[in-house]
Amino acid sequence: MDLVLDPPRGVAPILLGMTLDEAVAAASDWGEPRVPRRPGRNSAKASWTLDHVSVQALAEDGIHVTAVELWWPGEGRVSGTRVLLEGDEVFTTPAATLFQRAAERGSTVDTSQPEYPVIPGVSLGFTRQTSQNVERDADGLPTCVTSVLVGDENYYTYLYEEGGRQRLDAK
């Protein structure tokens, strides 16, 4: 199975803005979510595991999907489920290559927090952190990302407002 990242729209069949119940129905081929927290709370989520790849539909307002986050299979696990970004397999392509290709496509890649790089505006957020025994680069970071989050165009805007990360235009 291929899960294609479609920032800033979501990861088909889960689209940002649909209700959590709509997301669960849209992903019915994936089976029942393991850990649903139903709408009406401050935040809610539905989680699936697809051949060791974890997928979470996050409803941070308690009702609507605001982000979709995917996690790599884990140390020593191989998965037939691929997570693709512009044809690159997110969890097996070296992070440096992923970010270079994104920059070549015209995206700004913010690596000011190396363990949590962000591509604002699109919006993609990555994790390069794990306690597991994985290949690491010269800076000690996992060679490949360990998670990716797809949000809407404004998902990471707060990072660049007063008090957030350094503004990108100031670099």
Image (tube, rainbow, N blue to C red):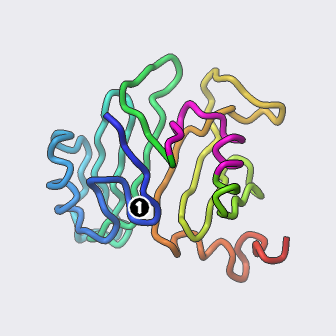
Seen in the picture, residue 168 relative to 31 is either above or below; the reply is below
Q: Which residues are magenta?
A: 87-101
x then y, percent, for residue 31: 16, 39
Residue visible at 22% across and 44% down in the picture: 33
Secondary structure type for disc 1: strand
User: Left or right: where does residue 153 sit relative to residue 39?
Assistant: right
x then y, percent, for residue 134: 64, 23
x then y, percent, for residue 139: 82, 36
Seen in the picture, residue 41 relative to 83 is either above or below; the reply is below
Seen in the picture, residue 93 relative to 157 is either above or below; the reply is above
Residue visible at 69% across and 59% down in the picture: 109
Residue at image mark 1 = 67
Give the residue at the far top of this rendering: 76
User: Left or right: where does residue 22 sit relative to residue 2?
Assistant: left
Residue visible at 31% across and 62% down in the picture: 15
Q: Is residue 97 magenta?
A: yes
| Circle 1: residue type | Ala
Residue 32 or 6: which is nearer the viewer?
6
The C terminus: image quadrant: bottom right
Seen in the picture, residue 117 relative to 170 is either above or below; the reply is above
Q: How many marks?
A: 1
Q: Is residue 128 magenta?
A: no
Please tell me how crowded label 1 is: few (under 14), some (14-19), or many (20+) other residues with Cα within 10 Å.
many
Quarter residue 63 falls in: bottom left
The N terminus: image quadrant: top left
Residue visible at 63% across and 30% down in the picture: 131
User: Left or right: where does residue 40 sit relative to residue 106?
Assistant: left
